Structure formats: C-alpha cells, structure tokens
Image (spheres, coloured by chain):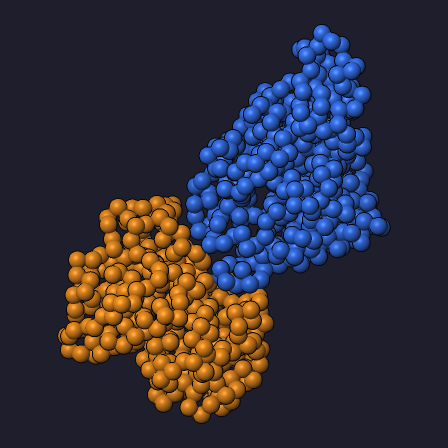
C-alpha cells in the first residue's frame, strides 16, 4: 500500500481531544502515522501529492454497539457482506452484533463459525456478542468465561430481558468474576405484555396494546440496585423514556455503569407512527416528544454514553402485515451518522459530543482500541461532507432489507469515503 | 319504493375506515340517508336495485352474528351480489397473509369489501392494497364505524337530537372499538359523554378525547339521557383485569338501582351480544320501555344500506 496524505480537513477525534483543521498521514502498513494541524503542505515532502479535503470532516470510524445481522439463520434479511457494505456507506467500521440469530449465539462451537464468516465476508470489524442465557430462554447462564476466551466481546439477550431477579444477580456475580461486559435490554415483560407502542393517547386512538415507560424503569431500577452490591461491567442497551434518564443521571453518582440510546428514539416520536406505519414498530417503542427531548438532553449532558443504530433488518414480508403481526425493528446503520448530525445542525448537541457517543465512548465501554485516530492505530476513519443534503430513499439503501424508519426524510451530511486499515472501501 | 338522493352532497372519503375520518356533514348525510331505508325495511317489498351489478365481499376474520348478517342483508336488499367469506376455513389458515388474500380477491373485481379483523388497522392496510371501496366492520379495538352510526340513528330517532344530550358509555372501554367510534361520533355531534369503567379497563389518556371519566358508575350515570352498556370482552383479556364477574356486576353491572341515577326517561343501549347478569340485569335488557337494543339491530341494517349506497356511488 502506498503512503496516503490528506490535508485541509476538519478533524474530530474525541479520544485525543482533537478538534482542529489539519491533515492525516497513513503509512504503508495502513496505520496512522501523523494527524492534526502539523500535517500541512509546508511540512510534507514536495514529491507527494496530498488529497486536499477542502474543509470536509474526518471522524474516527463509527463503532455501532447494537447491530443485528441475519447470519446464521436469516441470511435473507442481512448477511455479513451486505451488512459491511451498508455500514461502510454510513462511516461505520466496527459493529457489535447481537446474538439473536438462528441458532442463538450461546455456545463456543458456533463462535468459531461466526468469526470465520465475519473474517471472510465482512470488510469491517465484527465484534460478536453471545447471549446471557442459553437459547435466550432466561433460565440458565451461558459460559461467559469460555465464550470470552473465544472472542466474544459482551453478553446480552439482545431483544430479550432477564426477568428473573435471582438469575440477574447471579449473572452479575459471574460477570464480575470473569470481567465480562453485560448489556441489558430493559423491559418488564408483564407490564409490556403484547404491547407494541408507547402508552398514551396514540395507543388508545390506534387501538394498540401498549408498553408503559415504567416497564423500562422497573428493570433499570432493579438492575442498578443489584449493581450496587455486585459491581460488574453493566450497560443498558437503549433508553426510551425521560424518566429513565433522570434515574440514570442520579444513579451515576453512586455506581459505575453506562447506557445507550437508539438514534430512532433521539430523532422520532410516537406521532411518527401515523397511520400504522409498521417500519416504526420499534423496541423500545418511540415515546412522547417530551421523552425524546429528555433523551437529547441526556446525550448533551453526557448522562447517555452511546448512540446506536439498533440496525434490525427485516424483509418486506415481515413488515407488510397488520401492526400486531409485523416484525419489530428498523434498518438504520447507513443513516446513523447522518441522522445524528441532525442534532448538530439543529443546534441541540455539540458535534464533538455526538462523535464521542459514536466512536470513543463505545470503544471505551467495550475495551477495544477502535473509535480513535491515535498514531500507530489502524486507520479506520470516514470523510464526511457535513452539509451535503440528501434524501433517504428505500431503493438507494445498500442493506439487504429496506425497512428504514426515515423513508423520504431530508438529511444534511453524508459520508463520502470510508477507510478500514487504511484501505478505501467506500467512496461516493 | 323510490329512494330520494341528495346529489349535491358527496362523502369526503373513499373508504369508511373510521368515524375519525368523517366530518360532521358526512355523519349527518349518512344518518339522513339511513332514514329512508328504515321505512323500506319495514315495507313488504324490501328490495331495490341501486347496487345492481355490484359485487360485495364480506371478509370476516372474527366471528360475528349481527354485523355480518346485517351487512349481508343490506347488500342484498340494495341488489348487490353478496359473498360472505368465513375466513376460518380459508387460505389464511394455510399461512396466507392479509395482503395476499386481498390481492386475490381484488383480482376478482369486487366493488366493495366489508372487513372485520382482530387486528387494529387491518382495514387501513387493506384499503391501501385494493382498488375497491373498503368498509370497516370492526378492526381490533380501534373502530367500528357502522355501529356508532346506527347508535346515533337510534338516539336521534328516539330523542330527536344528539346535541346537548348526556350519554354514558359503560364497561370494558379498553378493548372496545364500539366505545372509541361512539366517543368520536357523539362528541363531534355535541353530546356530553361520560365514560364509566374500572381503572383496569380504562384506556390511557382517554379524557383527551373530550370525555368525562368515572370509576363510580352511579356518579357517571347521573342525569344521563342515554346509558350505553358494553360487553365484557373476555376473549381479548390476556391477564387479570377483574377479580370476578360477580364483583364486576356488583359495581359495574346495570341494575335498576344504578339506573335510578340517570334521567327517568333514560334509554338503555347495548351493541350486543349481551352477557346477561354480568354487565346488565336481564330485566332491564328486556324492558320495552327503556331498552332500545332491538331497535339498534333493526336500524343497523338501514345504516349499512346507506353506507353501502353512499360509498359505492
């Protein structure tokens, strides 16, 4: 690989507190050699022709902590190849995959398969999760230690929640002993039973069973109570309610844990469901505008650590049904960054805070050397034209499934190039 | 018998999916048109030919006695060719989706599909996929527009107006599409609506629809002109909402004692089927001076004839 020079870029690397105009040099080994304002035409060798980025932005490659891939079992919804192409077009270079496949990722033998497929078919970095319980049944723990040794990054039942308090307590004990990260999808099943959307006037009007926000709060409060006793690495996958943000803000003063939010809950509210739009049937559900505002505030004041895409590809057939029958989830990895930038463009959140929640924060929680532009590290990064207007069109999506929650939405800011280990793998 | 048509007025919607979509003018237009059919249905020759040559398919995914037979009769009396499909024995059982069923039927060029489905919004989905008119005969717990229209016609017939009346809707509001459609319609036409239900059967934020809510039935019935009872929908109850039927009857069943809190000339309504001794005292259900339950069924045919005619034109 030839050495590459980029100049005149706005570089944001929250990990090293870099936020300045400058350049980037990538060595022949695909690693970062130099970065920042000192990289400019004055101190580059004259024989080299640097790429002038003319004020475009360079961000570290995004680390998306919540992604569903259809392999194994649901390859028709998404496979590693289509996932990585979709991710690259959105500037995402590392993903944490959920274990809700068929079969469930719950034992050592399947991890080898997963790693092999990830390595052969994916161009981005795949960090697989295994389930907390066997077959995500919520009864027996999986082998955290052995699975972690095989390369499992974290443990979660993905779309499911551990309901049994005693089991959750034991999971935390094991996770503490073995140093494993556990991630909880917070929803009390009894309160959320058959629920599809937020409780309130919209659910009453549409005649749909609902999921009250206390279903989330009760699990969070229970887990944080357990966590006070057993201090393990604990992460709440996604928040949806304003009340949850309050509780987390207060609890973070006493006990160490982290939490995330889906870009869907940061950008949309329950009114967007309109006339039974099944693409907006999400888990956790979209809630009131006040909840969305509280989540944005939580991101702004850093109560919320991470933004995720909650990328859940579903084929057309799973969505062309009545709301009750339709599958839950939306495809979102391609639009994660652009949609997040909306929060910057409308003045809600600082750009650096958004990039931090997409890169260095998830990397820190996962304890991986990604999501930064430090010298000597793999050159995983994206170049972004932060003002470029574009419209989300189903037919232009790269993901195998087209179930976007923001069809026809006008966005501002688009990834123009994405690099992994110094190799340009996506270009507009 | 000739049926007068007010050609100047047009309905504002292509499909009848819910009362929410209608304007006050639309509702009054449908009710006015229904009047003529009441007389037709009482006459010797009940058949006219305004829908001759039209095909009506009744697509019922849930069991129904009165709504299905009412729509079938309505279509036949207007001269349409009516086909009622019992979806229990259909391809749906073989795994076909609603949309595929709809596309199959659509290929046979029907003019009207009347649909009842257990999922809220099923009729909306269907209406997006077919070329013909869709009439909602009840979707999940969302809407049952023709029931609300026939209730309004019954009230108007007896009380000569709806505006200013005080109307109590009592019982299992949470699972009831009839309650929702009636709330929209009656508040639009200027009635004061009281909702009476135990908290477990009261939908969230229902007061935002402009109704008063009561958990004490006697207070909710106070000075009401109409008492509309709803069936306890045990088949939709997925977890424990109530301790027992007998306790429910004690607190929320309509008894002469509770009815005394309403106006002395208050009328009793029920969309049927009734659970006698659970939500209503059997004597009250059959009291010909107070109960208009049979009249509701009778006017139901007239209202559905009006809807078929208006939406099919």
Percent across and percent down for residue B13 are 35, 60
**Residue at coordinates 52% horizontally, 38% vertically from top-left?**
A392
Residue A112 lies in quadrant: top right
Answer left or right for A128 relative to B116.
right
Asked if A208 appears above or below B209 in the picture, the reply is above
The residue positioned 32% from the left and 71% from the top of the image is B29
Q: Residue at x 72, y 29 (%)?
A: A10
Quarter of image, res A210: bottom right
Is residue A265 at least partly visible in the picture?
yes
Residue A402 shown left or right of residue A253 in the figure: left
- Choose between A149 and A91: the one closer to the eye: A91
Residue farthest along the right direction in this orientation: A254
Would residue A236 be seen by someone viewing this image from the given angle? no
Q: Is residue A182 above or below residue A163?
A: above
Q: Position of residue A219 (x, y in %)?
A: 70, 53
Return the x and y of residue B89 as percentages of the image width and height. Answer: 31, 53
Which residue is nearer to you in this view: A137 or B202? Answer: B202
Q: Residue furthest top?
A: A47
Q: Residue A260's x, y, as percent?
A: 70, 44
Q: What residue is rendered at 65% in x and 52% in y? A: A292
Quadrant showing the C terminus of chain A: top right
**Can you tell which quarter of the image residue B213 is in?**
bottom right
**Chain B, colour shown:** orange
Question: As displayed, is residue A338 above or below residue A246?
Answer: above
**Left or right for A145, reference B70:** right
Chain that appears blue: A
Image side of residue B181 versus residue A145, left or right: left
Whether residue B39 is situated above or below residue B53 in the rendered picture: below
Q: Quadrant of the N terminus of chain A?
A: top right
Nearer to me, B248 or A42? A42
């Amino acid at each position: 690989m030839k050495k590459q020079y980029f100049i005149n870029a706005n570089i944001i690397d929250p990990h090293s507190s870099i936020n300045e105009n400058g350049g980037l040099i990538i060595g022949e080994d695909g690693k970062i050699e130099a970065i920042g304002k000192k990289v400019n035409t004055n101190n580059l060798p004259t024989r080299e022709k640097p790429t002038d980025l003319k004020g475009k932005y360079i961000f570290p490659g995004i680390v998306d902590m919540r992604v569903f891939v259809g392999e194994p079992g649901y390859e028709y919804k998404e496979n590693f190849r289509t996932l990585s192409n979709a991710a690259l077009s959105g500037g995402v270079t590392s993903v944490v995959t959920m274990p809700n496949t068929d079969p469930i990722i719950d034992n050592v033998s399947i991890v080898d398969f997963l790693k092999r497929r990830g390595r052969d078919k994916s161009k981005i970095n795949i960090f697989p999760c295994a389930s907390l319980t066997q077959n995500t049944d919520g009864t027996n723990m999986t082998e955290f230690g052995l699975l972690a040794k095989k390369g499992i990054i974290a443990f979660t039942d993905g779309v499911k929640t551990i309901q049994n308090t005693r089991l959750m307590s034991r999971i935390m004990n094991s996770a503490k002993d073995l140093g494993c990260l556990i991630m909880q999808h917070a929803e009390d099943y009894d309160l959320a039973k058959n629920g599809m959307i937020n409780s309130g006037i919209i659910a009453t009007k549409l005649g749909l069973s609902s999921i009250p926000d206390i279903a989330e709060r009760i699990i969070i409060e229970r887990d944080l109570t357990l966590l006070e006793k057993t201090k393990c690495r604990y992460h709440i996958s996604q928040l949806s309610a304003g009340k949850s943000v309050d509780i987390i803000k207060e609890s973070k003063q006493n006990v160490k844990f982290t939490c995330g939010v889906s870009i869907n809950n940061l950008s949309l509210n329950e009114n967007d469901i309109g006339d039974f739009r099944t693409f907006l049937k999400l888990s956790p559900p979209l809630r009131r505008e006040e909840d969305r505002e509280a989540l944005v505030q939580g991101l702004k004041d850093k109560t919320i650590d991470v933004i995720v895409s909650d990328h859940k590809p579903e084929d057309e057939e799973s969505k062309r049904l009545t709301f009750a029958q339709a599958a839950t989830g939306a495809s979102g990895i391609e639009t994660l960054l652009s949609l997040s930038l909306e929060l910057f463009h409308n003045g809600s959140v600082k750009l650096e805070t958004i990039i931090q929640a997409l890169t260095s924060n998830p990397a820190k929680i996962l304890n991986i050397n990604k999501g930064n532009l430090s010298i000597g590290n793999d050159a995983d990064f994206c170049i972004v034209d932060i003002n470029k207007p574009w419209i989300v069109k189903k037919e232009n999506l790269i993901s195998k499934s087209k179930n976007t929650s923001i069809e026809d939405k006008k966005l501002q800011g688009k990834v123009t190039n994405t690099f992994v280990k110094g190799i340009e793998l996506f270009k507009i | 018998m000739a049926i007068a048509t007010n050609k100047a007025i047009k309905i504002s919607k292509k499909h009848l999916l819910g009362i929410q979509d209608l304007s006050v003018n639309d509702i009054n237009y449908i009710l006015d048109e229904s009047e003529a059919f009441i007389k037709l249905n009482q006459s010797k020759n009940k058949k006219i030919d305004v829908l001759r040559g039209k095909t009506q398919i009744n697509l019922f995914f849930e069991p129904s006695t009165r709504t299905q037979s009412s729509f079938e009769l309505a279509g036949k009396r207007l001269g349409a060719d009516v086909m009622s499909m019992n979806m229990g024995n259909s391809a749906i059982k073989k795994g076909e989706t609603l949309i595929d069923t709809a596309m199959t039927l659509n290929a046979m060029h029907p003019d009207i599909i009347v649909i009842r489905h257990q999922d809220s919004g099923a009729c909306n989905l269907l209406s997006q996929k077919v070329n013909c008119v869709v009439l909602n005969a009840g979707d999940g717990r969302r809407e049952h527009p023709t029931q609300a229209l026939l209730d309004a016609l019954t009230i108007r017939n007896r009380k000569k107006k709806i505006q200013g009346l005080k109307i109590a809707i009592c019982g299992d509001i949470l699972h009831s599409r009839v309650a929702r459609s009636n709330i929209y319609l009656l508040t639009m036409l200027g009635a004061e609506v009281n909702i009476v239900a135990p908290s477990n059967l009261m939908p969230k934020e229902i007061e935002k629809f402009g109704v008063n809510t009561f958990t004490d039935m006697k207070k909710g019935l106070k000075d009401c002109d109409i008492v509309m009872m709803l069936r306890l929908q045990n088949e939709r109850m997925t977890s424990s909402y109530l301790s027992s039927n007998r306790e429910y009857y004690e607190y929320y069943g309509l008894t002469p004692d509770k009815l005394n809190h309403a106006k002395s000339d208050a009328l009793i309504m029920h969309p049927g089927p009734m659970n006698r001794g659970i939500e209503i005292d059997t004597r009250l259900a059959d009291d010909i001076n107070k109960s208009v339950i049979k009249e509701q069924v009778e006017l139901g045919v007239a209202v559905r004839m009006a809807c078929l005619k208006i939406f099919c034109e």
